[in-house]
Amino acid sequence: MQNDHKDYGTASRRSAGEKVQQSAPKLASKRSTTGKSEVHSGMPALHVAMAAPEISPFAKSGGLADMVGSLATALERLGPKISLIMPCYRSVLQGSFQLEDTGVRFTVPISERREAGVVLRAKIGNATTVYFIRADRYFDREGLYGTSESDYPDNAERFVFFSRAILEVLKLDPPDILHAHDWQTALSIAFLKAEPGLHPQLSSLKTVLTVHNAAYQGVFWHQDWHLLNLESRFFTPAYLEFYGKINFLKGGLVFADRITTVSPTHAEEIKTTEQGFGLGGVFRERADSLVGILNGVDYDVWNPETDPFISKTYGPNGFLGKKACKADLQRTFCLPESPDVPLVGMVSRLAGQKGFDLLQKALDDMLRRSLQFVLLGSGEKRYQDFFGSVAMAYPEKVGVRIAFDDSLAHRIVAGSDILLVPSHYEPCGLAQIYALKYGTVPLVRATGGLRDTIHQFDPKTGVGNGFLFGPYQASNLLEAADQALALFDRKQEWKTLMRNAMAADFSWDRSAPAYLGLYQKLAGG
Ligand code: GLC
């Protein structure tokens, strides 16, 4: 099948070895005569395939990975059959995951070539299958999308390949819904809908595209157009053309049956010219199909009562464990072990979006206050350099770790008194939600999902779970910080605030049913 004439994407199973022979029929045997997958009751189970460029625990550069991994687990509990599709990065190959070769080999067109890939798989949860697209020349690299200096120069090709590969995996066991995440997978929807004749097995498939960060659109110069093998009529403003360039995210947005983003406030924000990052018009045009669903989190992973990474567990009824976690964190960063000095923590990608320029401006003033500050993150070099030098200048007050370190992230969330999230914009934000559960009080800018999850504490009524500031100015950040620091000294009120924070419930129980409802409506209509 590999040399099929104009079949854009052919999946073939290589008859090589026992494993291969065994795995192929398994994929097919779950199909009923109606073409729907079935559960034991005999009722057709909704089958949702989620495609994402990163999924926890296999590969993670940010909140997207956690969101997809935990949503999959939550959805599985609600009944549908879930499949996941992601690239087979080095972290997958070198991790301790039980990968199985499905025996599936495919080729897809890239420009005038055909590029080959292999489908591996693993199981997570009770019955969720994760499919990995293996093509080492594209994905067996140090980073997911690039280095701290720049993106990989062939990202257009890498994610055209991945998006076409997604459709090949879907053909093995056609689902009812394809739920794609972010620009790296958006073209799978465009390819499906722009070339329906090439994917007859997927003719009834409905599509959802979730935008986790509208600022990242996968924009490439027009000379890359040949990689996509789409007719030139699609390189026009109504489709993928974007100010003379190719916009992958836009390709998904114009073709998807439904669009979601990760908080209700952000769904409104992206329709504006300022926060639509050039796509405000597209979001406005598709407003009837656009909905904001707040992310949930997985409290099996982020829970101070069970967290294996922290030095002592604790819950809402006693904070001794939290004190131990704070002391442990201070030791880790070689800061004085002072229980009464408020410890402000940050765990974040070092990107402009996250408010680091604002923090840069406010930092000297902030460090005149009695506090300690610890930061964990990696990303843009200018911020890595800046915060590295701040740590050198203030060794008694500031600790910085430039790294991606999940275990240290848990220890910072547990050991800090205050978690700072001063984002310029924030589609949802997960760190502040994790912090709440650990009784670590969020101090955030009122934008996007931060506004939907954090409510200003009012000492008079004892209501609220954190501190917010509005306009993006250093003075506003400092004012909110002063409020938080003043309250920290009023121990009883601070405890009330901590308890409010810990009582907040942002588990997927709230939000997964909203996704399920969306899928069911689409599949039914
Ligand atoms: C992106 C967004 C963040 C969101 C996450 C998961 O990283 O910037 O706000 O929480 O995706 O949806």
Image (cartoon, rainbow, N blue to C red):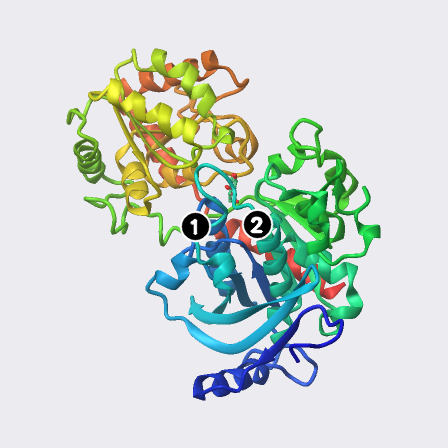
Residue 144 lies left or right of residue 96; in this view the side is right
Of the pair 303 and 143, the residue shown nearer to us: 143
Q: Residues within 10 Å of mark 2 (few under 14, many from 20)?
A: few
Q: Amino acid at mark 1?
A: Lys
Number of the front mark, 2 or 1: 2
Residues under labels 2 and 1: Cα distance?
20 Å
Give the class, few, some or many, for how many residues have Cα within 10 Å of label 1's Cα (few <14, many ≥20). Answer: some
Disc nearer the start of the sequence (2/1): 1
Across and down, in percent, residue 367 comes to: 30, 15
Q: Is residue 493 above or below residue 476?
A: below
Front residue of 9/196: it is 9
Is residue 46 among what the camera can see?
no
SS at circle 2: loop
Q: Is residue 468 left or right of residue 377?
A: right
Q: Amino acid at mark 2?
A: Asp
Along the horizontal axis of the image, is 412 left or right of 425?
left
**Badge 1 is on which residue?**
60
Residue 324 percent coordinates (x, y)? 17, 37
Name the residue rendered at 56%, 33% in the picture.
448
**Cβ–Cβ below 8 Å for labels 2 and 1?**
no
What residue is shown at x 59% (from left), y 83% (from top)?
A: 28
Please give the residue where the numbered disc 2 appears in the rendered image: 154
- In this rendering, is residue 153 above or below 137? above
430 on left or right of 316 = right
